[in-house]
Image (spheres, rainbow, N blue to C red):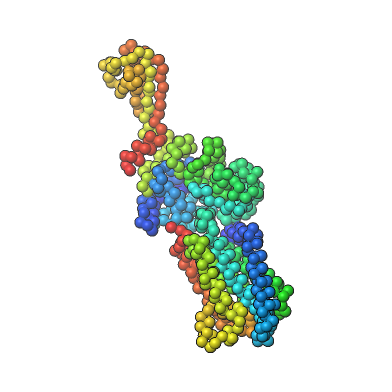
């Protein structure tokens, strides 16, 4: 299937001379959740802002469902909803009016039923006629999501959607994002919370210093770069690893009370059954065991520090 | 044409007027009434007629112009500056709207406000002094043209300003003095000959003159010149707005 957003050779150098994006190529698939990860100032917001029409690219092309964002901006932008990073709202407006305004702005005829549905989904219906300035920070965040959804976009950009948001609201947001995806909406979110990407995304792109370092299926990425570790708690203290077990990458820890075994999560055979057999044969008795997988965070840190 | 967007912005801006009714409508009306009390009743009775028109009546077109110009500029500049200031402009920039649609809706809303205001002042004035309008259609034409032209100027200022101070500075230091010196309260042939010539460089002279002609048939400069100059301002401001949008000046990086 043709990508819903196709970015080719996209670069942006600001008037100050700062190069925010350098030759980015990216295809975004229909109905996927793509997480763009990267440290502050990596170029995530610039990338989103160009696609949405807020920042003018220095060079390169972007098409949204085949529509060039510059030449055919109406068709391109009508498909997109944007939730900005900053909580920018019209303090004196009401949520209902704000959503009605957004819908009109994006060229859709008024639809009070849809506005009501969105407000209810975001638990803002009770507040529909109150001034926005009286809403809490979390409500304002939801309001911005509501404004972005008011015109039923097919693509939703969420720029750091959960920055400064409490756990409950975060869960609500993730649920909403999954529902939208199930309805065929493509979602692109930026975050520097790795757990968010790990929890939500189908694919993950890592941006640093304006370059897209990789885009990979999340599971694939974890498998490729992730390492697993088996920790064995021993019944009796072990002074050295017996020579019979030399062929395993084993390390003693906790003053000989623990044995760790590191293996590649990508390979089909972990080697664990054989290891356990050999341990038994060597007379080493095990009290408990656990495995752990390296998180995206560790992967991310190693990526950014390696190539950064 | 994204008419839904034009309507949405226009309504949004008109709702803002509704919320700031006191500031937008009531305060200019009150200050106009004060002008009438001072110039019309208190001092006006001691000033001789100008061109056969009582002084109180003579200043009505000028007073309307004064409010029309300052309010057009401040309404339109605030309308576009505020979203830039709060950051909500992101939505406008990311929306499928053309520059023309943005200008038409913001300037249209600002001009509507000042036209309504002008008519309210006219109605208020009619309570104080005898009024007659010789050329009602031309009166409306000058009213609309001036409101649109100076709302465009306000729009430009709202884009150019990078602080509330700059937003105030142009109306305060340029528009108001030009209006006062542009024959709002006098006919320019009351001036010494040298100053009559200097005054012709003041654009507001043409606006006030044309507008007053539509009331009383009295004009300082010929009516086609007035109309022509007003259209020139309109075109100049439109050209600047076009340049702003082509370059993304102060809107896009």
When asked about the image quadrant of residue B125, the answer is: bottom right
User: Percent from the top left, x then y, of residue B153?
Assistant: 53, 69
- Residue furthest out toward the left: A243
Is residue B1 visible in the rendered image? The answer is no
The one of B162 and A99 positioned closer to us in this rendering? B162
User: Percent from the top left, x then y, of residue A183?
Assistant: 56, 41
Give the answer, above or below, for where A36 lies relative to B126: above
- B138 relative position to A227: left or right: right
Q: Measuring 31% from the left and 39% from the top, which residue is drawn there?
A: A306
Is residue A39 visible in the rendered image? The answer is yes
The one of B70 and A270 positioned closer to us in this rendering? B70
Give the answer, above or below, for where A285 lies relative to A165: above
Give the answer, above or below, for where B219 lies relative to B150: below
- B219 relative position to A229: left or right: right
Tally of numbered discs: 0
Q: Measuring 63% from the left and 60% from the top, which residue is drawn there?
A: B20
């Amino acid at each position: 299937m043709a990508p819903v957003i196709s970015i080719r050779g996209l670069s942006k150098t600001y008037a100050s001379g700062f190069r925010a994006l350098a030759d980015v190529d990216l295809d975004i698939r229909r109905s996927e959740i793509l997480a763009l990860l990267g440290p502050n100032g990596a170029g995530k917001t610039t990338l989103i802002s160009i696609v949405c029409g807020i920042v003018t690219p220095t060079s390169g092309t972007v098409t949204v469902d085949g529509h060039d964002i510059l030449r055919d901006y109406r068709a391109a932008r009508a498909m997109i909803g944007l939730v900005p990073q900053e909580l920018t709202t019209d303090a004196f407006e009401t949520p209902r009016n704000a959503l009605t305004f957004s819908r009109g702005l994006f060229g859709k005829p008024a639809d009070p039923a849809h506005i009501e549905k969105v407000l209810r989904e975001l638990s803002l219906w009770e507040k529909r006629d109150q001034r926005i300035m009286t809403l809490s920070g979390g409500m304002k965040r939801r309001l911005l999501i509501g404004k972005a959804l008011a015109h039923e976009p097919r693509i939703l950009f969420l720029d750091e959607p959960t920055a400064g948001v409490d756990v409950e609201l975060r869960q609500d947001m993730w649920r909403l994002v999954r529902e939208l995806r199930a309805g065929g909406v493509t979602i692109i979110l930026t975050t520097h919370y790795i757990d968010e990407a790990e929890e939500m995304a189908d694919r993950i792109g890592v941006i640093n210093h304006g370059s897209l370092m990789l885009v990979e299926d999340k599971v694939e990425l974890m498998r490729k770069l992730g390492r697993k570790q088996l920790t064995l708690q021993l019944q009796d203290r072990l002074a050295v690893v017996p020579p019979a077990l030399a062929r395993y990458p084993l390390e003693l820890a906790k003053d000989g009370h623990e044995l760790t075994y590191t293996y590649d999560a990508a390979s089909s055979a972990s080697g664990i059954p054989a290891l356990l057999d050999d341990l038994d044969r060597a007379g080493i008795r095990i009290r408990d065991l656990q495995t752990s997988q390296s998180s995206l965070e560790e992967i991310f840190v190693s990526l950014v520090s390696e190539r950064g | 044409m994204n008419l839904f967007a034009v309507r949405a912005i226009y309504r949004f801006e008109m709702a803002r007027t509704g919320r700031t009714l006191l500031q937008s409508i009531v305060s200019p009306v009150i200050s106009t009434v004060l002008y009438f009390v001072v110039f019309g009743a208190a001092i006006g009775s001691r000033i001789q007629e100008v061109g056969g028109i009582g002084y109180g009546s003579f200043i009505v077109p000028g007073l309307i112009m004064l409010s029309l110009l300052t309010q057009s500029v401040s309404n339109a500049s605030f309308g576009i500056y505020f979203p830039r200031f709060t950051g909500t402009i992101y939505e406008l920039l990311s929306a499928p709207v053309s520059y023309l649609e943005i200008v038409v809706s913001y300037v249209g809303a600002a001009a509507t406000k000042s036209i309504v205001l002008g008519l309210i002042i006219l109605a208020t004035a009619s309570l104080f002094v005898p009024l007659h309008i010789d050329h009602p259609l031309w009166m409306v034409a000058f009213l609309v043209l001036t409101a649109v032209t100076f709302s465009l100027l306000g729009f430009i200022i709202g884009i150019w300003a990078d602080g509330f101070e700059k937003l105030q500075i142009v109306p305060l230091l340029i528009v108001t003095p030009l209006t006062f010196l542009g024959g709002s309260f006098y006919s320019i042939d009351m001036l010494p000959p040298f100053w009559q010539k200097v005054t012709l460089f003041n654009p507001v002279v043409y606006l006030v003159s044309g507008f007053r002609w539509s009331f009383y048939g009295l004009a300082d400069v010929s009516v086609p010149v007035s109309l022509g100059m007003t259209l020139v301002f309109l075109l100049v401001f439109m050209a600047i707005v076009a340049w702003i949008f082509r370059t993304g000046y102060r809107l896009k990086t």
